[in-house]
């Protein structure tokens, strides 16, 4: 079992989750600033206004990465720092650009390869107010294209670009459950703005087209000289049948992955939506115009894979349209025989099951013709971590085991199954604003003391990463 000698490993974060400094240097508000301010939306009533204060601690963060031996770092750019109002005719904020240019210079100086995510959910609020943000099929892709071009031009030294992080989350959690910004949902108990049955599919479509536009710009205007690569990051859980004897449960396992991953990956690799989605959603799923299809098909230089957990899948029949985003099935942590998929964590949706990672890597590789894969997120929260003493927190054996199991599963996928996985970014470099869960759920390999000056303390899992990868990566 091994990984190739040029394998890139490191850690990942996202702007709104770590930067803080919400008012600094001309930053504009994003939909997450607006959403966090609404009482009841964030578990602990918090926001990303201060977070880990990483905007002001770039040196400290780079020193941390260096001390952990990281070869790569994935972070996102806050669009609101670059174009505070968001649009293609709105003013550009040079101070925001300068910040990220310097950050990349400093990373490279430290020998760390940057992976930049252009959009990790913090849409400029101005665009949401002006034309409905991600719902706008004509304006949004053009404004994203413009912002992407500004960044490609500013940072030619970055060789790994990710357009969107987890469009599934923006579409479903933002426009179906309302659990994420901008909080659209038809659920009357959760404020009932928007149309959960239709909006998510339009948002997904618009994100795909915006991705395609940015990729076209990169390939035509920058890639020939900069020689970098660009792709999208998709989230997806592994699936196992609730009853392995029931062909409908077995079939539902693929359908679940299609509704999470193939929703985006099929148009990107094949130029069309999966049949299972067309069948279930009918005319609620937009159809590609010829121009849109041409933009989207073939638009990945690599596949960015975010992966955390697995579920047992039980098929269903006849669900109402507002509840069908999973693909007419139930996701469970127990199977028919009563086996449990994995131990509890602090996140209701996450239970470790490393074999699922290997299986899903194989599933992706087979369906999409062995694309180059970067694992752009993988990690876990830990049950009750927020209530432990610092001493206990720093001994996070549960997380050490999670990474050990998952990274070994990935190394087997590479060396025994022939999956072309070339990089791995653990989520996350440090504890941070865990969206609707606030600060009580911690995903960091580094503990952040939010009460005492955001001080960072690497946990055992942070220090375990270098020896883990060194034991697997082949020497030249
Ligand atoms: C990812 N779910 O999000 C994100 O890319 C990160 O920003 C985030 O901090 C990390 O995973 C840990 O949650 C997800 O509810 C958030 O299924 C929620 C879900 C999945 C992924």
Image (tube, rainbow, N blue to C red):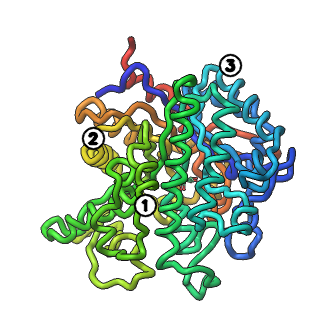
The answer to whether 278 appears left or right of 395 in the picture is left
Between 176 and 394, which is closer to the camera in this rendering? 176
The spot of residue 109 in percent (x, y) is 68, 19
Badge 2 density bin: few <14, some 14–19, many ≥20, Cα 10 Å: few
Secondary structure under the numbered disc 2 in the rendered image? loop
Query: Does 242 sit above or below residue 102?
Result: below
Q: Horizontally, is 475 left or right of 389 in the view?
A: left
Inter-mark Cα distance, 1 to 3: 45 Å
- Residue under label 2: 369
Q: Nearer the viewer, residue 59 or 401?
A: 59
User: Does label 1 or label 3 sit earlier along the sequence?
Assistant: 3
The disc label shown at residue 109, or none = 3
Q: Please name the residue shown 63% across and 25% down the image.
A: 157
> What residue would you read off at disc 1?
289
Quarter-wise, where is residue 455 in the image?
A: top right
What residue lies at 77% left-to-right and 69% top-to-bottom?
37
Position of residue 347 measured from the top left corner of the image (x, y, whole percent): 52, 61
Please state the horizontal and vertical placement of residue 429, each as a whole percent of the image.
Answer: 61, 40
* Foreground label between 1 and 3: 1
Is 393 drawn above or below residue 279 in the view shown? Answer: above
Q: Residue at x 60, y 87 (%)?
A: 189
């Amino acid at each position: 079992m091994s990984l190739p000698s040029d394998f890139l490993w490191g850690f990942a974060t996202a702007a709104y989750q770590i930067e803080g400094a919400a008012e600094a240097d001309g930053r504009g508000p994003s939909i997450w600033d607006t959403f966090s301010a609404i009482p009841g939306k964030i578990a602990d009533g918090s926001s990303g206004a201060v977070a880990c204060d990483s905007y002001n601690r770039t040196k400290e963060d780079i020193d941390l990465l260096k001390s952990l031996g990281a070869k790569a770092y994935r972070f996102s750019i806050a669009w609101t720092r670059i174009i505070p109002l968001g649009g293609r005719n709105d003013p550009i904020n040079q101070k925001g650009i300068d910040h990220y240019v310097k950050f990349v210079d400093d990373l490279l100086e430290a020998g760390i390869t940057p992976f930049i995510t252009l959009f990790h959910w913090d849409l400029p609020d101005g665009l949401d107010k002006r034309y409905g943000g991600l719902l706008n099929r004509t304006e949004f892709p053009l404004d994203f294209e413009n912002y992407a071009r500004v960044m490609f031009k500013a940072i030619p030294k970055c060789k790994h670009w990710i357009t969107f992080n987890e469009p599934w989350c923006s579409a479903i959690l933002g426009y179906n459950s309302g659990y994420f910004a901008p909080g659209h949902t038809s659920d009357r108990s959760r404020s009932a703005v928007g149309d959960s049955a239709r909006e998510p599919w339009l948002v997904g479509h618009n994100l795909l087209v915006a991705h395609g536009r940015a990729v076209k710009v990169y390939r035509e205007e920058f890639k020939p000289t900069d020689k970098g690569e660009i792709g999208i990051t998709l989230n997806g859980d592994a699936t196992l049948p609730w009853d392995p004897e029931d062909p409908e449960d077995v079939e539902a396992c693929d359908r679940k992955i299609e509704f999470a991953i193939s929703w985006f990956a099929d148009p990107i690799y094949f130029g069309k939506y999966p049949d299972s989605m067309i069948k279930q959603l009918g005319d609620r799923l937009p159809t590609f115009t010829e121009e849109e299809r041409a933009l989207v098909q073939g638009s990945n230089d690599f596949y960015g894979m975010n992966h955390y957990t697995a579920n047992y899948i039980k098929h269903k029949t006849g669900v109402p349209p507002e509840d069908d985003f999973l693909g007419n099935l139930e996701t469970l942590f127990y199977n028919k025989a009563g086996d449990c998929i994995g131990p509890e964590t602090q996140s209701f949706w996450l239970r470790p099951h490393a074999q699922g990672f290997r299986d899903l890597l194989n599933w992706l590789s087979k369906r999409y013709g062995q694309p180059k894969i970067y694992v752009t997120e993988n990690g876990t929260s830990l049950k009750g971590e927020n209530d432990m003493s610092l001493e206990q927190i720093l001994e996070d054996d549960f997380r050490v085991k999670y990474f050990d199991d998952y990274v070994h599963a990935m190394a087997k996928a590479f060396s025994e199954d022939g999956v072309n996985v070339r990089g791995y970014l653990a989520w996350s470099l440090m504890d941070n604003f865990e969206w609707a869960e606030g600060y009580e759920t911690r995903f960091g390999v580094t503990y952040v003391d939010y009460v005492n000056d955001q001080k960072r303390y690497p946990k055992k899992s942070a220090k375990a990463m270098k020896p883990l990868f060194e034991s697997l990566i082949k020497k030249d």
